[in-house]
Amino acid sequence: MSEKPKFIYDFEEGSAEMKYVLGGKGANLAEMTRIGLPVPPGFTITCQTCNAYYQAGNKFPEGLDEQIDEHLPQLEKKMGKTLGDPKDPLLVSVRSGAPFSMPGMMETVLNLGLNDDSVRGLAELTRDERFAYDSYRRFIQMFGKVVMKVDGELFEHALRAKKEERRVRLDTELTADDLKELVAAFKKIVREETGKDFPTNPRIQLGYAIEAVFKSWNIKRAVDYRRLYKIPDDLGTAVNVQTMVFGNKGSNSATGVAFTRDPATGEKVRYGDYLINAQGEDVVAGIRNTEPIMKLEEEMAHAAAELFKIMDVLEKHYRDMCDIEFTIEQSKLWMLQTRIGKRTAAAALRIAVEMEREGLISKEEAVNRIDADQLDQLLHPQFDPKAKVEVLTKGLNASPGAAVGAVVFDADTAETRGLDGHPVILVRWETTPDDLHGMVAAEGILTSHGGKTSHAAVVARGMGKPCVCGAEKIKIDTVNKLFSVDGTVVHEGETISIDGTTGSVVLGPVPLVPPTPSAEFDTILNWADEIRKIGVRTNADTPEDAAKARRFGAEGIGLCRTEHMFLGDRLPIVQKMILSDDEAEVNRALEDLLKVQKEDFVGIFRAMDGLPVTIRLLDPPLHEFLPSGEDLRVEVTKMELTGAPEAEIAEKRKLLDAVQRMSEMNPMLGLRGCRLGIVWPDIYKMQVRAIMEAACEVKSSGGEPLVEIMIPLVSVVNELKVLREESEQVADEVIATYKQDIPYKVGTMIELPRAAITADDIAKVADFFSFGTNDLTQTTFGFSRDDIEGKFLPRYLERKILPANPFETIDEGVAELVEMGTNLGRRSNVDLKVGVCGEHGGDPASVKVFHKIGVSYVSCSPYRVPLARLAAAQAVMGEAKSDSR
């Protein structure tokens, strides 16, 4: 007989290591219980039970109800109270808790166990009728919205109406009788909206609440959040049923959220918010403006001292910055949750470096704690300090960085305009989890309420978006789509600027400047460089980009695209070379291009002095440098209809004929890359001459150019053999003319499946391979990147046909080709250097794959170089961890 699955663990049974069973919240509640901290008792229903619920067709799996009925009496016994008892009721909270933190994305129900009888018992027991009915109206409001799916705004409208009727501003100013009337009004709303009475049986309430938490695993905002942070959908959420403690029992009660260090800067100071006489949702929802955590010493000295001591205990125990939720009930401190706190990239770096110096963690742990993607935050712009700025108002500096955009007042508009390429600032009274899609699309977030631990602040920091919270002077009118500050009116669509580092809000655009990375940034990356095994280069086409990448730690250029040097004011020269029938004119155009390309290469070699520079010869088809055939046909027709001179029409027709001759059905698979060099050999010869002359000039002036010439789109070894011979002939001729010793390499891009499969042959005539994973992905899948991303890729991702966008994170099939090509190539050429120069070279997840394959280096855009350096180090440590298992 098979053993029945264990669906439920009491807090005493678990530990921090069980987060994939108990979820992060449940595991940490168990851990705090284990080390003797004051945690309200409870039990956790496992993440696997959530999956079993869905597998059973959205029904409790067999045996769950029975286990609830076993653990609930044990909890009642511990507390000496019974759920729903009319004289001394046990009340519980029902909260979600996935293995990875998903703040505010799933549902919570508080004060469960109240009904018309138990609320009277609670009032008599506490001798506080107002507290009892405040708890009851909160329960009906939350249960009605979360479980019974009543529009939450209906409850808020009734609450506002009651405050207006009583001419008070705060919820806390309502009397017990007012709250009794609200209870009746809320129950009426539930009945009218659902056709059902509010449930009064506490055990039925509990079952419904647990099911609502399970269901919240798949609500839109939770799914969006998981997709954004690449959290697997099959983990499920745990459900934590925990004894309620109350921060709304009067002036000697409070609730709050605290961090053991500043999550925005990383400074070793206590940080957070609290409210006197409030429940937890009041703090995160921004309903009332909070007090800074250090002020708690003035109002509740004993509880504050105990809290600060526990914060130190938790940080030392977890060896990381902790995020803590607490409640003080009539001067007694209770710990409701702890977890590793979310933080900005700047804070993460400072905390990691300082904890290493404090002896809490090793250098390797410090490097491993930095999220490579998060480093992007440090590369966000700031207000130009030279700009004259008139601050419209100020709020809390909730998430650093600066942003400029048009004002929008709802998430849907933010998403629509953002996807259209228009920068927007999402302005809200306070954000909710349902605003997530708009926050993702916005450049920054501005709210008029809420503290530094509000939803807007926490989510923005995680995304690396600038955010200003609690700007109280902003009066928002969502009906008329405007906000005002002391008589200044700002309409939707008008531009504002926000500075999440200082909390400033400015009317109009402010010039932005890129930030300067901190000393900790360099420290962590230097430690990463000591650990990583693969090199990191950059993709750069200009001296400016090359210099920038070198400052970020690039060890050379892995891809210099020469086609970008054919654009701008050089385009007429290129068009003359392509279109002319006169050989002399073609040669003059080639000479002109030689001069300008040589200047470009001189600048790049100087910027990368002493480091390798891989220059790809011309890759795109020539028709890309010509006008659109469709546009030309329109022009010719207009000229004919308007009676333009015949000579001008003839010239335009000639151009149109040339464009039509060169057009292809599938240009990405047509006359481009090495095929172009074979059909138009003078173009490649000109480019090689420009490269080598530039290298000779730099060498003669004391520089050290390291030249690597790359032939693109090779699929047959003979293509490379022919073009290598021609390139070497030109290069050696230039070297002899300049009398300079310039070592150079000739290699190829592997971007076609056939090239990967026959890499052993190709490697015999190549000094290096560079995998062009953009085109290799296209040709492996048969996808056109430009077409799929707007047409069917979103549906493929939504339906999990693909686990990720294969143009962002390397696909396992494409990775197999990279590994095959690498191994085959090195089998026939042991000195073969292998790089990756597609967009994947800057994707942290892909870098770890390339490390495992054993490439020599990855190459990425300048701003992704720090991410690649860090990811390469983390790949080494991840490999070591796997080997030790």
Image (cartoon, rainbow, N blue to C red):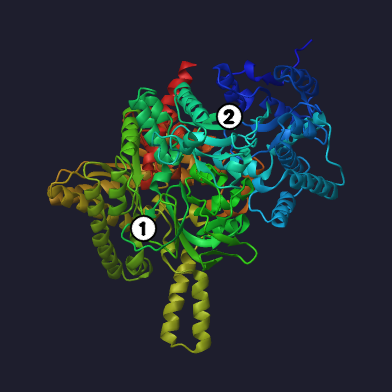
Label annotation for residue 802: none
With 736 as the anchor, is 220 left or right in this view?
right
Residue found 43% across the figure and 30% down from its top: 369
With 793 as the anchor, is 866 left or right in this view?
left
Label annotation for residue 564: 1
Mark 2 is surrounded, within 10 Å at the Cα level, by few (under 14), some (14 to 19) or many (20 or more) other residues, namely: some
Callout 2 amino acid? Ser
Callout 1 amino acid? His
Quadrant including the N terminus: top right
Specify which label sits upstream in the sequence, 2 or 1: 2
Q: Position of residue 422 (x, y in %)?
A: 52, 61
Q: Quadrant of residue 348?
A: top left
Q: Position of residue 778 (x, y in %)?
A: 52, 46
Q: Secondary structure at mark 1?
A: helix
Q: Position of residue 96 (x, y in %)?
A: 66, 33
Q: Which residue is mark 2?
A: 331
Residue found 24% across the figure and 57% down from its top: 598
